[in-house]
C-alpha cells in the first residue's frame, strides 16, 4: 500500500498542536537563526504529522525544515520522529544529473582526453564475426589473415598500437585492411546513416550556402573523392577559401568558391599603338648631301630672313 493511501485526511489534534516541539527539533538540527515561520503541516498517517518551517539559510531559497512528530495509540505524549530539510514547491534545485555520455558534445574533447566507447555502441559492429566461414583461399580466411599479419611484421617493426602501418597496395595486408579485418570493430549501417545525416545537416543541399551556390560540389574541381559507400554521396572540400575547407561535404552542397563558377578572364591584349613611343626615330637638322638639295649659304640665309 502506498504512502498516499495511508495518510489521514484530518491530522491528529495533539500532533498538530506540537508546533513548539517540532520547532525546537528543527532549531537543534539547523544552524542558529535559519529556522523561520511555521508554514504548514501535513498528516503523514494515523497520529503522524509533519510540520514545515521556513528556511532562511542562504542558497536554500524555497526550502523548508520538516519535523515529523508522532503519538502512540491511546498515548497523550507526542514524540519526535525525524527532522530533515526538504525542497518546497518553488525551491531552487540543482539541475537533474545527466550521465557524461549524454552531456558530451562535439568539440568537447581536448588534447590528452580519452573517450571510452560502449561495448554495445550501435554505431559499431565487429569487423569480422566468423558466422559465414569463408573458403581457405578467400582473402578473409584465417590463414590469409595470419599471412597478412606476418607480412606486416616483416615490413614494420613495433606493435600497431605504437606505430600504425599502412599496407602497400596490392598486398594481402591491403586486402585485409580494405575488408576491415585489422580492426576489431567497424562502422555499422546505423553508424554510417547517422554520420551521413550529421554531415548532410552541416554541409548539405538544404543549407543556405548551398541554396545560393551557382553549382554543386559534384562538378567542382576542388572536391576530393572518398572511398567506400560514402563516396557515392560525399567528398572532401580542398578549397582554402571555402567555408567547408577540409570538411566532408555532400555532393549536392555548393558555395561561391566553385572552380567553374566564375573563371577569371585572360588579361586583355593592348592594341598596336599608332605612334610607337617605345623607340626613337632620328630627325637630322640638315639634309644629307645624298638627298640632291644644296644647303643655303650664309648670305642667302640672311636675304631670306630680311625678305620675310
Image: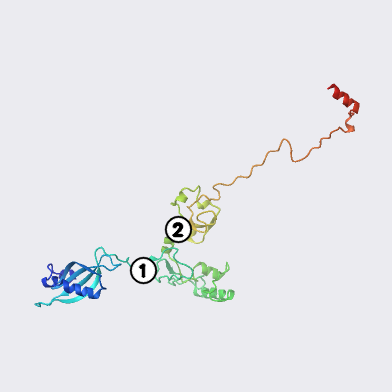
Is residue 297 in sight in this rendering?
Answer: no
Question: Earlier along the polypeptide chain: callout 2 or callout 1?
Answer: 1
Given residues 263 and 240, the one toward you in this image is 240
Above/below status of 55 relative to 247: below
Foreground residue among 240 and 80: 80
Tell me the quarter of the picture where residue 75 sits.
bottom left
Of labels 2 and 1, the one closer to you: 1
Q: Residues within 10 Å of mark 1 (few under 14, many from 20)?
A: few
Q: Position of residue 57 (x, y in %)?
A: 28, 69
Q: Is residue 158 visible?
A: yes
Give how far apart the Cα atoms at labels 2 and 1 are: 25 Å
Q: Give the residue pinned by disc 1.
A: 99
Q: Quadrant of residue 89?
A: bottom left
Percent of width and height locating residue 283: 81, 35
Rendered residue at 86%/24% (across/down): 304
Residue 120 numbered mark, or none = none
| Residue, far front | 33
Q: How many C-alpha atoms fall within 10 Å of the one at disc 2: few (<14), some, or many (≥20)?
A: some
Relative vertical location of residue 282 with respect to residue 108 in this rendering, above or below: above
Quadrant of the snapshot with the N terminus: bottom left
Q: Secondary structure at mark 2?
A: helix
217 to the left or right of 264: left
Horizontal side of 193 relative to 52 (left or right) equals right
Residue 86: x percent and y percent?
A: 25, 69
Image vertical order of residue 278 relative to residue 117, above or below: above
Where is mark 2, residue-wise? 199
Residue 240 lies in what quarter of the image?
A: bottom right
Amino acid at each position: 500500500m502506498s504512502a498516499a493511501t495511508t495518510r489521514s485526511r484530518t491530522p491528529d489534534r495533539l500532533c498538530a498542536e506540537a508546533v513548539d516541539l517540532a520547532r525546537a527539533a528543527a532549531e537543534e538540527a539547523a544552524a542558529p537563526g535559519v529556522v523561520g515561520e511555521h508554514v504548514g503541516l501535513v498528516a503523514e498517517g494515523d497520529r503522524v504529522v509533519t510540520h514545515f518551517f521556513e528556511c532562511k539559510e542562504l542558497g536554500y531559497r524555497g526550502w523548508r525544515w520538516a519535523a515529523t512528530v508522532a503519538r502512540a495509540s491511546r498515548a497523550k505524549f507526542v514524540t519526535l520522529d525525524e527532522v530533515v530539510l526538504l525542497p518546497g514547491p518553488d525551491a531552487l534545485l540543482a539541475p537533474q544529473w545527466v550521465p557524461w555520455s549524454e552531456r558530451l558534445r562535439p568539440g568537447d574533447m581536448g588534447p590528452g582526453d580519452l573517450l571510452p566507447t560502449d561495448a554495445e555502441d550501435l554505431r559499431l559492429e565487429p569487423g569480422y564475426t566468423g558466422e559465414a566461414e569463408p573458403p581457405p583461399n578467400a582473402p578473409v580466411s584465417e590463414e590469409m589473415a595470419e599471412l597478412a599479419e606476418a607480412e606486416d611484421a616483416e615490413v614494420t617493426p613495433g606493435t600497431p598500437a605504437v606505430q600504425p602501418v599502412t599496407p602497400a597496395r596490392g598486398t594481402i595486408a591491403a586486402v585485409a585492411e580494405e575488408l576491415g579485418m585489422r580492426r576489431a570493430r567497424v562502422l555499422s549501417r546505423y553508424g554510417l546513416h547517422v554520420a551521413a545525416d550529421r554531415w548532410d545537416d552541416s554541409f548539405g543541399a538544404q543549407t543556405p550556402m548551398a541554396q545560393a551556390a551557382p553549382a554543386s560540389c559534384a562538378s567542382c574541381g576542388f572536391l576530393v573523392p572518398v572511398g567506400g559507400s560514402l563516396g557515392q554521396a560525399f567528398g572532401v572540400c580542398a578549397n582554402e577559401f571555402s567555408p567547408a575547407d577540409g570538411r566532408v561535404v555532400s555532393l549536392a552542397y555548393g558555395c561561391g568558391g566553385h572552380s567553374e563558377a566564375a573563371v577569371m578572364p585572360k588579361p586583355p591584349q593592348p592594341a598596336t599603338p599608332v605612334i610607337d613611343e617605345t623607340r626613337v626615330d632620328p630627325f637630322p637638322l640638315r639634309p644629307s648631301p645624298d638627298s640632291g638639295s644644296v644647303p643655303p649659304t650664309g648670305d642667302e640665309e640672311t636675304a631670306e630672313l630680311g625678305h620675310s
